[in-house]
Image: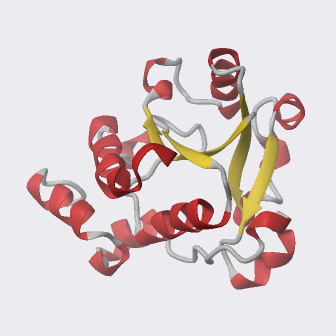
Amino acid sequence: MQETYLFFGSFNPIHKGHISLVRYILSNTVSDIWIIVSPQNPHKDPKILAPFTDRYNMVRGDVEEYGDRVKVSDIEELMPKPSYTINTVKKLISQYPDRKFCLLCGSDIVDTIHLWYKYDQLKDLIEIRIYPRKESERGKCSEDLMNAPVLECSSTDFREKKDISLLSESTIHYIESHNLYR
């Protein structure tokens, strides 16, 4: 059965930390990875989000070099808002019964994931694998991701500081040409 990591996020915008995790998974596992661009995270203010299509296109531009092992999905765009992970996982499992899905989550959510909508059902449906967001949180990580790169940067860092060093050339160009995050 093909193992597929599901990497959910707003990707507002996608940054080098996201890409370094994708690269690590592709280099260190036989799995592929599906990036699920969330149109509206129930824990985030929708007013700060760039339009879904722009975020989706930036992610596609940043991962196209990885070929078939990375899929960018817009599955949540047509689903009811806000997007709940449990609903998306159920839909993916029903559409792709030949795949074993694993949910990628950053170590920063370990203490609050139990508050997610229908978390008890989610943890029974899918294996949750934790990657490091801070060096000090490596102890919270899944064994296969213990040595993954630390993702201490965030999309919020970019939006607040306009630090383009956090972004790829492709994303910088897209942001500038579409006049985003002004």
Q: Nearer the viewer, residue 84 or 104?
A: 104
Can residue 73 be spotted in the picture? yes
Q: Position of residue 11 (x, y in %)?
A: 44, 52
Can residue 50 be spotted in the picture? no
Q: Is residue 15 above or below residue 78?
A: below
Q: Quadrant of the C terminus?
A: bottom left
Q: Is residue 157 above or below residue 117?
A: below
Q: Nearer the viewer, residue 100 or 104?
A: 100
When asked about the image quadrant of residue 84, the answer is top right
Residue shown at 78% from the left, 73% from the top: 146
Residue reaching furthest left?
177
Q: Is residue 62 left or right of residue 69?
A: left
Q: Is residue 65 left or right of residue 171?
A: right
Residue shown at 79% from the left, 65% from the top: 144
Residue shown at 23% from the left, 62% from the top: 170
| Number of marks drawn | 0
Q: Nearer the viewer, residue 59 or 52?
A: 59
Q: Quadrant of the N terminus?
A: top right
Residue shown at 50% from the left, 27% from the top: 76
Q: Position of residue 120 (x, y in %)?
A: 90, 33
When asked about the image quadrant of residue 3, the answer is top right
